Image: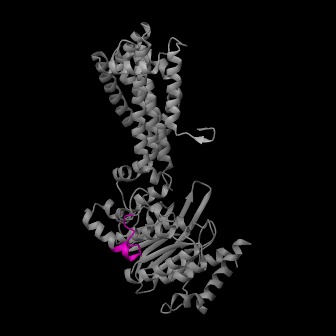
Amino acid sequence: MTVLGYRIPPVYSLLIWIALWELVGQKEWAFIIPPFSGVIDKLADLVARPDFQAAALQTFESFVVGMTAAIVAGIAIGFAMGRNRTADQILGMWVNVFASAPLSSLVPVLMLLFGIGQTTIIVTVFLFAVWIIALDTYAGVRHVSSSLDEMAQSFSASRWQLYSKILFWAALPEILAGIRMGLIRAVKGIVIGQLLVSVVAFGRLFRTFSDNFQFEEFWALTLILFVFALGFSSLIGWAEKRVEYYAGSRI
Amino acid sequence: MAAVNDGARSQAASRSEAAAPGVDNIVEVRSITKFYGLDVHALDSVDLDCPRGEMTTLLGPSGCGKTTLLKIIAGLLAPSAGEVRVNGRPVTRPGPERAFVFQDFALLPWATVLRNVAFGLELRGDARAGREERAHHYIAEVGLSGFETKFPHELSGGMRQRVGLARALAVDADVLLMDEPFSAVDEQTRRKFQEDLLRLLDVERKTVIFVTHSIEEAVYLSDRIVILSPRPGRIQQIIRPEISRDISPDDIRRDRGYIDTVEEIWGNLRKYLE
């Protein structure tokens, strides 16, 4: 961003928005927007509350379990589709449908299937993340040059060696991109899931805060989730950087 | 003269060569035919023998099936009919007595030069210390000492192919199969590489089957040049360049025999372009 010919680093643009937020809050222009300083105050209180800590732990647990399952299943589906025509024909259409479908509408059905509780949240996280991971893995596997395949064959590599020493690494940049997108979707999934179920973890807190017009707490919780999503996504971004040196030079 | 007659004649010639006593043919190709799908007839009943320790070049217009033939010998492609024998045993899949050098190098972009060169040995299950020692030796042989920890994207095209060659040499196969190894390399590098390859093969005593579309490259490098006709590929002629290998590389390129052979092959191949 440039203002009056001066280049302003991105972090300062964030500060400008925060200042604007503070101004809107202080002037009480919109009752749902309390001053930023008040939100930060409440954030400190919120983090210390036992019900928040329990909710955070439960949310984190659902997230990790659902996400791990989505990574494992997504990579497996992507490899199956990328390496096997039949699997591609059988799964391809469904994976594409689910990757673009509005999955939030499925959450009530999941509640019927898995009950009102953590299982539903885990399944929601899984369903939000798995398809994009599968699609990106598929793209990565299809992108592997056929001569690497022939090279492995020419040295009589076993199937396991072909997958673990060549195909996985060759597709890794796409797999990581898929995981990063999956993570972002999973954060959405967990919030939507918990809001719809609304009696668990953050969903209950969100519901309580908005019902009681506790907008400072509400925004504090939203901020925490933003930071959480950003943190995870930067972690994957960092891993992506580590494979960047060969991502562009693959043939 | 019709190509078919030509083909028939030289196949007869190559058969009589095979029958000659005292010639140890490490690779024997028998009536290899290859169809891709129903329409594309890539190779038609090819017979060929490659004597041990010699460099045989497959030369021909693009689409004549020379790479197909090489990949069938490698066991990477199955023929539609016919048989390939290496060391007397029929080929059904790749084996340790053959090593392949790829046109596009086929290096692991995430692995160092050292690991790439040792990769054939790694797949074979050799212990790390042993395979890295061998890799160091062949990295030096191809002139890449000091580049062990570099990654492929940090190397020039010519250096990448040296890595590909070192990897093929490291597994100590009897037969090197090289698929247009210098086609992605610029002209100056290519000449230097050709000279180095001849010097290296003098030491390593390998049998080489080499695919190229460059007449000069074929004549400069080969003991025997096998000329294939356009699709469906048949053996059209086999030439032994009469060039003394004792003279310097530059003198070879000025040698009467070298120039005449290039001209002869060009005269033979140009009819396919008209």
> Residue B147's x, y, as percent?
39, 68
Most extreme residue toward the right, as rendered?
B274
Q: Which residue is drawn at 36% across and 37% down?
A: A72
Image height of A94 relative to B217, above or below: above
The quadrant holding residue B142 is bottom left
| Image-quadrant location for residue B85 | bottom left
**B88 sits left or right of B179 in the view:** left
* Screen quadrant of the N terminus of chain A: top right
Q: Which of B195 and A32 is in front in this view?
A: A32
**Residue A94 visible:** no
- Does the stretch in magenta take in B109? no
Residue B142 among magenta residues: yes
Display colour scheme: one colour
Task: Please determine whether, in this image, residue A146 is positioned above or below residue A213.
Answer: below
Instruction: Measuring from the top left, give residue B92's x and y in whole percent.
Output: 41, 62
In the rendered image, residue A133, in percent from the top left (x then y), is placed at 45, 36
Residue B69 showing in the rendered view: yes
- Position of residue B85 relative to residue A44, above or below, is below
Label count reads 0
Residue B259 on image: x %, y %? 62, 88
- Extreme top residue here? A212
Highlighted range, magenta = B137-149
Q: Which of A234 and A147 is in front in this view?
A: A234
Q: Residue at x 52, y 37 (%)?
A: A10
Q: Main secondary structure of the magenta part?
A: loop
